[in-house]
Amino acid sequence: MLKLSTRSRYGLLAIIDIAMHQEKGPVPLREVARRQNLSENYLEHLVGSMRRADLIKSVRGPSGGYLLARAPLKISLGEIIRVLEGPIAPVECSHLDDEKCFSGTDCFIRGFWEDLRVEVNRVFDSKTLEDLMESAKKFNSISGCLPQD
């Protein structure tokens, strides 16, 4: 099973929350934490990673908070996940360019893992933040979307 960590799940919720509430100005992280029932301290780390990757930008001051750095249509889910997790791959050796498997030789199944990696990345990159926002609007909520581990 290709399983995304809590880091990605919480990070996606945070950036969707910011995207859906930024029309009134910068979104304070404490509001995101409250709405999503998440730790503000943990969200600070996730938001910091996304800010350094130019997915979101911060605004300082009494009315400060976070805004998207680009339009939601221009931010793919793959880009967000790679910022939060690193390469999207079913097994570690499937994303190593021209490297051999960990056994020290080329692996007979590596081609399959590489094909799977390409397809999974294609799916993640074909979906945008805007797609998730539209889905959230249909449900009229983005809270309560955290799967149990």
Image (spheres, rainbow, N blue to C red):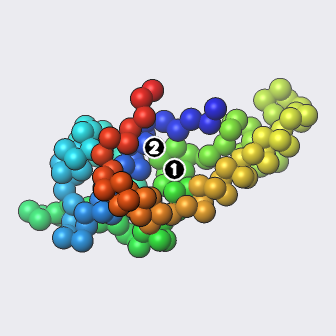
Element under label 1? helix
Q: Quadrant of residue 37?
A: top left
Residue for point 72% across, 52% down: 119
Determine whether, in the image, residue 75 is placed left or right of residue 133: right
- In which quadrant is the C terminus drawn? top left
Kind of residue sitting beneath label 2: Ser
User: Which residue was labeled with disc 1?
Assistant: 81
Question: Is residue 71 placed above or below 12 in the rendered structure?
Answer: below
Residue for point 21% across, 65% down: 26
Residue for point 19% across, 44% down: 34
Determine whether, in the image, residue 92 is placed left or right of residue 133: right
Question: Is residue 133 placed above or below 144 in the rendered structure?
Answer: below
Question: Horizontal and vertical percent for residue 128?
Answer: 50, 63
**Callout 2 touching callout 1 (CB < 8 Å):** yes
How crowded is the residue under tag 2: few (<14 C-alpha within 10 Å), some, or many (20+)? some
Residue 145 visible in image: yes
State how far apart marks 2 and 1 are (Cα). 6 Å
Kind of residue sitting beneath label 1: Ile
User: Which residue was labeled with disc 2?
Assistant: 8
- In which quadrant is the N terminus drawn? top right
Question: Horizontal and vertical percent for residue 74?
Answer: 49, 71
